[in-house]
Image: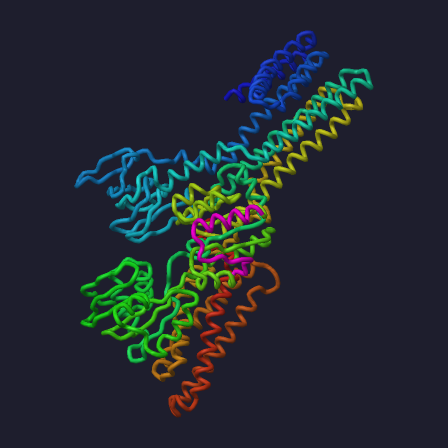
Amino acid sequence: MRRHLLLIWAMAGLSVGAGLLLAGRGDLAPWAFGLTCLPVALHVALNLARALLGGRLGVDVVALAAMLGALAVGEAAAAAVIALMVAGGEALEEWAQGRARDALTSLMARAPRLALRLEGEAVAEVPVAEIRPGDLLLIRPGAQIPADGRLEGDAATLDESALTGEALPVSLAPGAALRSGAVNAGAAFRMRAGQSAEASTYAAIIRLTRQAAEARAPLARLADRWALGFTAATALLAGGAWMFSGDPLRAVAVLVVATPCPLILAAPVALMAGIGRAARRGIVVKGGGALERLARLRTVVFDKTGTLTPGQPRLAAMDADPALGREAGLRLAAALAQGSTHPVSAALVAAAAARGLVLPVPDRVEEVAGGGLSGQVEGQALLLGSEGFLRDQGIAPQPGFGLTAEVAAAAGSVAWLAVEGRMAAAFVMADGLRQDAPRAVRRLRALGITRIVLLSGDREAAVAPIGRALRLDAVLAEQSPEQKLAAIRAEVGAAPTAMVGDGVNDAPALAAADVGIAMGAAGTAAAAEAGDVVLLVDRVDRVAEAVAIARRSRAIALRAIWLGMALSGLAMGFAAAGLLPPLAGALVQEAIDVAAILYALTALRPGREDAAPAVLPEAAGLVARHGEHAGLRQLAEALGAAATRPDLPVLAALEARLRAELLPHQRAEEQTLYPEAARLLGGQDPMAPLIRMHAEIETLAERLATLLRHAATAGVAAGEAELRRTLFALEALLRLHLAVEEEVLAGLDAPEKSGR
């Protein structure tokens, strides 16, 4: 407020002085200009005194010397213009930083104060500070969720734009996790609080916001150091001009145009603008210092589970006794798994549901922690768990059985099913790559990150394939938290290093890195508190985006500093030569200030290096097509299984699925999705390789249909070898096509995902 009052005073005083000159009262005008200057000079002198008491020389000394010098030599009008320049520069800085902080401070303004708690049949309005885990809360339409928890009862529609930048509401099913700060965009619903309001997501974001707003950037301190050198050079030039010309006006003119407002304002404005831009992309940066370090990175270290992988196991492959069959084995295993909340059990149930299997209710389910399950399904005694768990029960794999599972186990763990005391099926569980992980790594490489490391506590067999798939520089597996900390310290000693993680065991490594980047959307509070950067969206590609924003913001800050210094230096040369009098110099310096700060504000806008992903139109159908990929992967798995034991009815059913599911999927992609994707990706026909794969898949499908027509009359055995080759080729090509297509389209967003 004081800055605005000083600006109003300076503008009013300058206007009064100019009016007096126009009215022919040149005797009174200098007094008006002098009175205009004095309050601003006093304000600058107080700031300078506080700086001296703090042990540093404030850079405002040049502005103070310029105002007092102009008054001393009778250039009161120039002194008034300098006063307007100083007051205007401070007011512009306040406005600019306010613009840059809008994305962060708006979160604080929206913090809920009251909540509705259900107490029996009554509804009580309570302060959010009184919410405790287990409380049943009522969320009215338009109300904000006050604490993290779980949705109870009916489905809900939420506006999560304050947390993720997502423009469209999201629909959640009963039991879904809820994060505080989201707004109810549908009908009223009930939720069960899982944490207190203070320990919830929104409160953590507010704490991060305060830290980001209060931190002072190293680059701003660097600008201060440059400003001190600039001040010394100014004093020498001003003194030299006076000495050689004998005219004190030249010294005053040099001081006027040397006022270092662009130097001391441009860097913090650019960095705060970068923080604001990052916040709009769901990236909270804890202050300009973190942003400046982020821009200097040369090494990035990733955790695996929950960071490069979703952290949720899925069924990757299965094998079963031929007498039982794979589908029947999965049905029994998933039925028993309903009695457990273990992630592997959840993955089996999800896989069965995706295949449309109806699961019976299990009986007498007992769970051994860290081992497995026992129980009965449809009168059959079942055991489900690790190989060691089954061996403890006296059950060992049959010779030769489970070979497929054992080979695939190199990339995951295996859950074994025993039926009536005999090993019956094996299920390979894997935690695959995030869809956006390859793109994140490639973009980091493009940004100049020279070393990317995978650091995980998981076993070597599970970690190595991730490193190979992403072409990482080093893979460190089976690392304890202490070993992770030591590895990070070694990387920090070699180059500026970031650590990306989400778990409690990652917190020490996050704190030890030059920049700790926490996956805050699904990660732990400990990781978010230890990190310098927190990703509020569950996407690892935001890491590369954060680096790009930081680099652009720092580059703009440096260019704004050099712009101000270069223009001021040029004007100082003219002033020392007597070509720029004090009043004109003051006006020139005012223009330099505005130019440098407005340039610094360009960090609010995206550039080529930090542009958000292009958004496909909804009509392109990206979400629908990708949603069909799970079913197509199951179809590929069924093709591979049929190739091992060709059976005419099974093959006929698979050929019908190819015609009913796969071929229409490919036609829809070529008609709607691929043309829009090609337009956004650019280049010469970027979708041509995918269309060629479609053609090859159609050729193989037609060959399979021809072979089946022949087998219907001559028998399967007559063309079994060719049938096997065709089925294996179809499986391999379909799997490859799905992976490549997802990779090509990973750089594009659908409207439903924009900003996430």
Q: Residue furthest right?
A: 244
Between 490 and 739, the one nearer to me in the picture: 490
Residue 72: x and y in percent read: 70, 11
- Looking at the image, residue 635 lies above or below residue 223: below
**Stretch in magenta:** 470-493
Would you say 337 lies left or right of 53 here?
Answer: left
Question: In this rendering, is residue 134 above or below 80?
Answer: below
Viewer-nearest residue: 695 or 216: 216
Residue 401's image quarter?
Answer: bottom left
Please say whether residue 696 is one of the residues in the magenta stretch: no
Residue at figure coordinates x 27%, y 39% from the top left:
132
- Left or right of residue 651, residue 418 in this image: left
Judged from this view, the residue extending furthest toward the top is 27
Instruction: Name the quadrant containing residue 688.
Output: bottom right
Q: Residue 551 at x, y = what percent?
A: 59, 44
Horizontally, is 42 left or right of 565 in the view? left
Q: Quadrant of residue 359?
A: bottom left
Q: Position of residue 165 (x, y in %)?
A: 44, 45
Q: Is residue 142 left or right of residue 751?
A: left
What's the image's color scheme?
A: rainbow
Q: Is residue 142 visible?
A: no
For image coordinates 38% across by 88% down, the residue present is 712
Location of residue 555 with respect to 237 vertically, above or below: below
